[in-house]
Image (cartoon, rainbow, N blue to C red):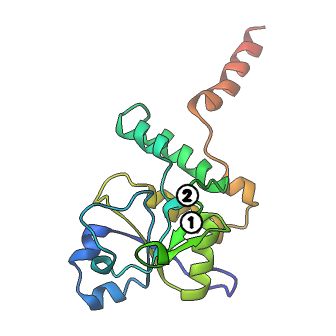
Amino acid sequence: MDKNQLPSLRQASIFDVRAMSEAERASLGYLVLVMRRWPQGFSWEALDLQLWLPDAGPSPELLKAYQAKQIDWEEFAQRYRVEQIGNWRRAGYYKVGKGDEGRRESQMSSLQHLDELRRQYGLVTVLCHELKGHCHRYVLQKLAHDKDGNEQSTSQILEPPPTMQEQEKPQQEDALQKVN
């Protein structure tokens, strides 16, 4: 690994982590919960959690639109990328322990925070509640890895993919020019 490249960011479900032995959990490295709201039925101790980063979760409005099937997965993922890349912060804090005594004010974006953790601790695993299927932690993981491993400019890497209408527009313009 290049000395400037950060260790990989891993991901897991909180259900899987809760079912693991202590040794298995330790093999995951530094555990970071990346959900906007605390998961019901889970304790800090049950997850062996080191950090809760609420701003790494999707905004409540975005999550609600996806859960209500007002937007599809591709649009959700695109909008979530924009939230994370734009240093979007609503909570403005993170937690290193239970209760108010564990609360710390956030001075950086979620991606910056995860980069710092990877520099400091090496292996970092982000956690969310989805067992399988679509989950924002996959998008977050890809954002972190794309940003690390590519020589492209940051704007090229972090730009959301073009929409279907944007992709079709040049084709429509070409067709009009051929007609005229």
Q: Is residue 42 visible?
A: yes
Residue 91 in the image: above or below residue 60:
below
44 relative to 60 in the view: left or right:
left
Image quadrant of residue 151? bottom right
Residue sitting at x 68%, y 88% = 3
Disc 1 crowd, CA 10 A, few/some/many (<14, 14-19, 20+) = some
* Residue 20 in the image, given as x and y percentages of width and height: 23, 81
158 or 53: nearer the eye? 53
For residue 79, above or below residue 8: above
- Quarter-of-image position of residue 29: bottom left
Task: Tell whether 170 sits left or right of 38.
Answer: right
> Tag 1: residue type?
Tyr
Spatial CA distance of label 1 from label 2 is 5 Å
Residue 127 in the image: state x and y as whole percent.
Answer: 39, 68
User: In what element is the residue under mark 1?
Assistant: strand
- Residue 28, percent across and down? 39, 83
Residue 51: percent from left, percent from top: 47, 76
The answer to which image quadrant residue 143 occupies is bottom right
Horizontal side of 148 relative to 152 (left or right) equals left
Identify residue for label 1.
93
Observer-nearest of 104 and 155: 104
Element carrying mark 2? loop
According to the image, label 2 marks what residue?
91
Q: Nearer the viewer, residue 78 or 167?
A: 78
- Callout 1–callout 2 Cβ contact below 8 Å: yes
Q: Quadrant of the C terminus?
A: top right
Type of amino acid at the residue the image marks with label 2: Ala
Return the residue found at the far top. Answer: 180
